[in-house]
Structure formats: structure tokens, C-alpha cells
Image (spheres, rainbow, N blue to C red):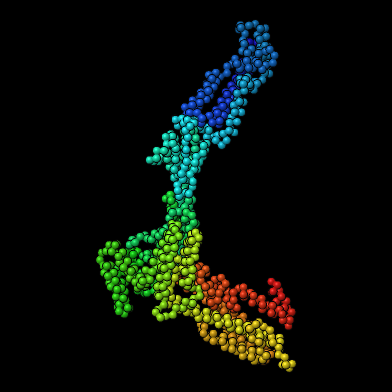
Amino acid sequence: MDVSSKNENNASKGLDVLEQALRRSALAILSERLLRLGAALVTLALFFVALSWLGLWRAIPVEARMAGVALFGFLALYLIAREIARGLPRRKAAAARLDAAADGPMKPAASLDDTLARQGADPATAALWALHRKRLEAALAATPVTRPRPRLPERDPYALRALALVAAIAAGFVAGDEKGARLAAAFDWRAVHFLGPAQRIDAWFDPPAYTGRPPIVLAQESGAVEAPVHSTLRLRPAEANVSVDGGLAPIQTPDKKEREFTLAGPAQLYLPDGRTFQVAAVPDRPPAIALTGKPRNNARGSMTLSYRAEDDYGVVSAEAVFTKPGGGRALYEPPRLPLALPAGAGGLGAGQATLDLADSPYAGAKATMRLEAKDAAGNEGASDAIEAILPQRRFTKPLARALVEQRRILALDPEQRANVRAALEALSIAPEVFETPSSIYLGLRAARRSLEGGRTDDELRGVADMLWAMALSLEDGDTSQAERDLRAAEQALREAMARGVSEEEIAKRSQELRAALDKFLEQLGARAHAPGEPRESAGNPDSLTADDLQSMLDDIEKAMRSGDMAEAQRLLDELQDVMENAQTAEEGGPQNAARQKRQREMQRALGELDQLAREEQRLRDDTFQGMKNPSDDDAGKPQQRGGKKGQPQAADDASQERQRQQALRDKLERQQDALKGDAGEAGQELDDARKAMKEAEEALKSGGEGRGKAVDAQGRAVEALRKGADKLAEQMRGEGQEGEEGQEGQGKGHGRARGRYGQGRDPLGRSSGGQRASREKYDPLGLPPAQRAHRVQEELRRRLGQPERPAEELDYLQRLLQR
């Protein structure tokens, strides 16, 4: 290869190295220019933020805001356009940057671009030129491409970038939590009228009255605000030109002094004075209502519901809605009855309501029930649906029961009217034999004729109403009217309490309720007893007397006078429970009357057993004392045995004790004969007691030597008598509960009121000391708990004072007293 070719190859390699270095240098120059542009834009943005946070845009008209934002935008665009106009870095500038970084006077980047002036020079010149280029290439390879240096201090001699940063930081402290709102005010160009400093805008939200919340006045600074949905936004003066977005809708109002908007959802509010607000609408949730217990059907055809209602503001109405399972045609719509709201504020909390379904054609039928509640905003909530047997009145007259049954069949399924007509025809047979009243007989014939041929629903409803009227006439006579008057008086008092009327009005309604209650009880008692028949008011110690009911009314009036309406309503609910479950022995039927008679006989038997157990215990104590302290006839000093005051002196002769034991055994046998087959499980215990008495009697025949065996047998007799009395009392309570379970849930309210106002006696007629008789253990001593404990302690001290007792027994008695 000749020298010329070598020189060309070397030149080509040198140019490649030069191009790479120039590209790196140009990239560094471009980076410097971009950094300077970014610094300028950031400085401009910091000045804009500082002015915004200082509140400049709120203090100037909207037109000035637009001009200011436009100025900052123009400056930013100018800076960007200026850099774009300069274009990409040129080759000469890149070479100059490389040469400036080279060591020595050589400028390798610029010199490598040089060429020989004359091509085809002699070899010596070519060799010399090649050597020169090698030196330039070596120098270029040793020259580094320095990092970008924007030289901001040289470009910004007054340090405006630092001033912008400090100003922005200081303005941030001034703005506080309103940084975003003040910055957004620069772009609020919607209001085009400027309000002078002397003009003021008042803005506030009026929440709906049912929320109970005070007006919400908008602050003097922008921000976020919460208001209940359906609140009214009021603005003064009315000529203020505001802008709204979202859920604020204008309201037409005749008042020319203010403007009004209604809040339906989240919204934005822009006021002419620069304030902006993000309005959050607090939703009004639907009310929630649910049963808190199983519905209770009462004896007089009503249903008592315990429920709980919840809402964010309050409930204005609640009702029980019934539907007929399976649908189908019926003459009457299913019942839809209002519920008495709880006494708490806004009708919230736990409540109880009694639904009068006695007159409903659906009484006694199976239906689906749900509770519905509504608030003041119209929102509705419902409970889960349940299936229930609707309560029905208890009719004791067979003909009345049959008429009610046919009325229900006709009302719920009009297609069955042929069967109803056949049933009415059968009920009309032989009125003189079945003693059917003439008015009822004529009514049956009229109803039967009304079911013949094609009939409209209105005509069929007339037949159903006729059947119901005849059933009431047979069953109640005038009592049904007294019952309706009582319920009307009770409802009037409830409404008066809910309205918060004056004390005079409350007293008047209370007196009306008292009079209606007296009339109802009078007619109820007249039905319960035939003329001339004695009334056994004490036959059931747990029953409520008229005085107890009057005491309940007195407590209701006292609670209302003191302003405790919640307590008054609770007591009124108790009274209603008692009256809804009130029934006579006739209404209970023959089985109920027989059960009450058996209960009275068992009560008398319990009293006898109680007395018998105490006498047997006294005889055992006397026998035991006779065994420990035998008579001292030889010394002529008969010794008296100690005992409680009023107890008989110990007999000196065992035959007297045997005679007493025989008399007690005879008394027990007579009591067993009186109980006959009613003793149940108690009969075995009474047999054991009788056998133990017989054993003690035989032991006493041998005189004083047999007293030890007699004491043991007498102890077994006492224990058996107590167990027998316990089982007999438990049997009485079980029969009473079975009677109450004849209709589901009946008598629960009666029991609550009885525990507060009734006699509260056990099956023996003794005071239970404030406890329910059904929960109290049978007590042979027949004393209240405090007195009974005192008697037991006295007996323990008496026995502890007898040193002749065994040491183990005395030690045991001592420990009992210490406890």
C-alpha cells in the first residue's frame, strides 16, 4: 500500500473520532440550554404561586385576573419559543466547546477539519501532514467532554430564582389551608362583575326543619362545607351574580332581597367576591325498622309488637303491612295499621304497639307481615317479612264461633260462597231446639238469601259484615261497645301525649280513660258471674284488682305531670297489655274453670301440708329433748325442757308423744284422701311421710327407750313432707303455665303489671317478699326472707346453748353461725 492510501485511511479514522466527540459536545450544549429554560420557567411559576397564595387574584377584578394569567402565560411561551428558535447546537459551537477544554494551545477539534490546500503533494509533505493529524487526534482523544454547565449565576445576576423560591415559601405560610382555593381563584373567570370593597355578600345554608340543625353560615374564606341534602342556600343581595355547578338548583321566590338554591347533591359555589366552596351534600339515609321480639297475640284479638326504629334525623310514621300469602281474590284488602312511635326524640329507639285486629276479616288467618317506616324526607324503610297467624277474638258461644269462621271463609275466598251458604243453612236448622234467638235466626235466613245467584263484591261484603254483627251480638251484648270506648279513650290519651298538650287536656283524657276502664270492668265482671253468684276475688292471689288498675292510672298521671312522657307511655303500654289479655272464666272455657278449681284445692292442700310439717317438726324437737333430758320423778323435780316461747312443754310420758304422732298421721291420711289423684309426684313423698310417722309411732310404744328411733323417723317424715309440698307447688306452677300457653304469648304484659301492682303471693297466699311466685321455692316456715333468716339464727343459737349435744354437732352449729 502506498503512502497516499495510508494517509486517506488515517484521515477517515480521525474524522470518525471527531464526529463522535462533536456529538457529545453538542448534546452537552443542548442540556445546558434546557436547564436554563427549566430554571427560567420554574422561577416564573414560583412568582405566580407566590402571588396566588398572597391572595392577589381575590383582590383584583376578574378582568385583571385574566390579564395577569395571560401575562404569565405569555412570558412562559416567550421563553420556550426563544429556545426553539435557536435551533440545535451548531458544529462550530460544539468544536469550540471541545477546543476550550483541550490542554495547550492546540485546537484539535477545529484543526481536524482542515485539509491540504493542494492535493497530490509530494511524499514528504504528505508524511508531515499525516504526522500533524496524528498529534491532533491524540490531543482530541485526551480532551474530555465536560458536563453541562448552565452558568445560572451568570445568566441571573440578580438571583431572581432565589427570590421567587423564598417568596413562594413565605406565601405558603400566609395561605395556610387555602393554598388550593387561592391558586384556583386565578382561573375563576366566571363572574364578570367586580364588587367593590363596600359591598358584602352573605351566604348560608338552611337545613330542613326535620334535621334539627342550625343554619350553616359560609366562612369568609374559601373552603369546603357540608350541608344536609334538601338544604336551602340563601344569598344576599339578590343581584349578586354567582355561579354554581353540580347539585345546586335555583328556586323561584317572591323575595327580591335574596336568592335561593336547593341542594340535591355535591356542588361547587363561586361567589363574586372571590370565595369558592366545595359543597358536600350529606345524604338522608332511609329509616331502618325491625322487630325486636316475636309478635304476641292477645286474648282480645289484638297483636302486640316490640320493634326498634332508627334514622339519621327521625321517623314520622310507621305501620304494619300484611299481605295474603299466595295472592288470590279477597273481598277486603289486607290490614295496614299504623304503629305508635317510640317516645324518644324523633320517634327513634325501642317502641311497642298494639294492633287491633279483632274486627278484621283476616283475624285467625295466616298472613305475611312487615314493618314500614317513613321519615320527613319521604324515604321509606322496611323490615324483613315474617309469616304470622293473625290474632282473633276468643268466642265462647258455639254459634258465634261458627259465624266468625264462615265470615272469614267468605271474606278471603268469595268463590266459597256456596259452601258458606250451605253452612248457614245448617246453622238455621231447629232454632227452637238450639235456642237460637229470633233476631239471629232471621239474620241467618237473610244472609243465606243474599248469597244466592250472582252477587257483587259489595253485596258479599255486606253479608260478611252481617255475620260479624250477629257473632258480636251473641257473644258480647253491650260489652263490645264498652271495649271500643276503652280503646278509643286509650288512643286519645296517647295522641294527647304525643302532641304535648296542656295539663288540663291531659287530665281530661286521663279521666275519660278512667271512666271507660270502670265501665269495661263492670261489664266484664257482670259476664263473669251470674246474678246472685258470689265473686271469688281472692280465688287467684296473683290477679290484678280494680284498685291495682287505678294505681296504674295514678302512676301514669303522675309521670305525665312530671314531664316524663317516656315513663308514662311505658306504663300505658303495661295497662294496655293487661286489658288486652283480660278474660273471664267464661271466656277461658270449661277447661279453664276446672283448672282454676283444681288450683284452689291444691292451694288449700299446700296450706295443710305446711302446718303439718311444722307440727311434726315441733313433735320431733320435743321427742329429742325428752331423750336428752329424761324426767326426774324420783327426786320430785320434774325438769322442763327449753324451747321457743309459745312452744308446748315436753311431755313426760312417751305415750303422749305417740298419741300426738298418731293424730298427725291421721291428719296426713285425710289430706291424701282429699287430694285423690291430683297429688302427682308429690303422692310418693306423702306416702313416705306417712310410713315414717307410723314407724315413729311404733317406736314410741316402747317408752323412752324408743325415742332415738322415733326422732330419726320423725326427721324423715318432716323431710318427706317438705319434698312433697315442693313437688305439689311445682305441679301447680306447671299447670298455670300450661293454661297461659293456650294462646301464644298471652298474659306476658299481665304478668309484668302483676309483678309491679299485684299481690305477688306464692301458691299458699303468702307474701313473696317482692319476688314472683312462679320463681319462689316453697318455704315451710311461711315467712319473708329476712324474718325467715332471723328465725333460723335463733334456732341455731338455741341448739348451740345445749351442752348435752354431741361435740361434732356443736362445732357444726358454731361454724354456721360464724358464716
x and y percentages locating residue 71 in the rendered image: 51, 24
Left or right side of 644 for 79: left
Left or right side of 581 for 85: right
x and y percentages locating residue 246 in the rendered image: 44, 39
Return the residue nearer the eye: 732 or 323.
732
x and y percentages locating residue 388 in the rendered image: 43, 63
Return the residue nearer the eye: 423 or 511.
511
x and y percentages locating residue 794 in the rendered image: 66, 77
Return the residue nearer the eye: 512 or 167.
512
Q: Quadrant of the N terminus?
A: top right
Q: Quadrant of residue 705?
A: bottom right
For the question of whether residue 220 can be seen, the reply is yes
Q: Quadrant of the C terminus?
A: bottom right
Asked if 718 appears above or below 162 in the picture, the reply is: below
Left or right side of 433 for 353: right
For the question of whether residue 738 can be seen, the reply is no
Return the residue nearer the eye: 664 or 331.
664
Which residue in the rendered view is the most extreme toward the bottom? Answer: 634
Which residue in the rendered view is the most extreme toward the front? Answer: 504
Q: How many marks?
A: 0
Asked if 768 appears above or below 567 in the picture, the reply is: below
What residue is shown at x 43% (from left), y 51% (from top)? 376
Asked if 57 appears above or below 663 in the picture, the reply is: above
What residue is shown at x 40% (from left), y 75% (from top)? 526
